[in-house]
Image (cartoon, grey):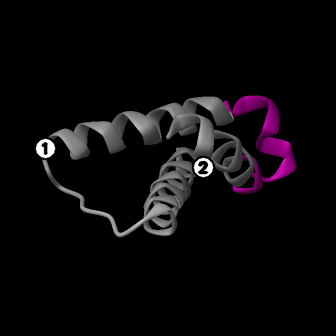
Amino acid sequence: LYDRFAPRLRALARRQFESWLEPKVDHEEAVQSTFQSFFVRIREGCFSFDGWDATWALLALMTVRKCRRRRER
């Protein structure tokens, strides 16, 4: 799962920040935080998926929201 989606999530996270924020933001941290939250919720039974597209959609949404919170800080 990580190998399948991490590169795309890193690219997505990178696009969420303006160039002047680049040096101050760790994109990998946002991606790691996304996966951490995802796996915690999977263990809790919060998600069910119909396929890879649904998994990607959820991971992408989680990543964008995490990046937005980091931008606001």
26 on left or right of 54: right
Location of residue 23 in the rendering, given as x and y in whole percent from the top left corner: 80, 30
Q: Which amino acid type is shown beneath numbered disc 2?
A: Arg
- Residue 12 location, quadrant: bottom right
Residue position marked by numbered label 1 in the rendering = 44
Above or below, comparing residue 72 to residue 28 in the picture: below
Q: Is residue 15 magenta?
A: yes
63 on left or right of 23: left
- Determine the residue located farthest toward the front in the rendered image: 51
Mark 2–mark 1 Cα distance, whole angstroms, equals 28 Å
Above or below, comparing residue 38 to residue 33 in the picture: below
Q: Which mark is residue 71?
A: 2
- At a point 54% along the width and 52% down the height, the residue shown is 72
Q: Which amino acid type is shown beneath numbered disc 1?
A: Glu
- At a point 57% along the width and 30% down the height, the residue shown is 29
In the image, which is nearer the foreground, mark 2 or mark 1? 1
Q: What span is colored magenta in the figure?
A: 14-26
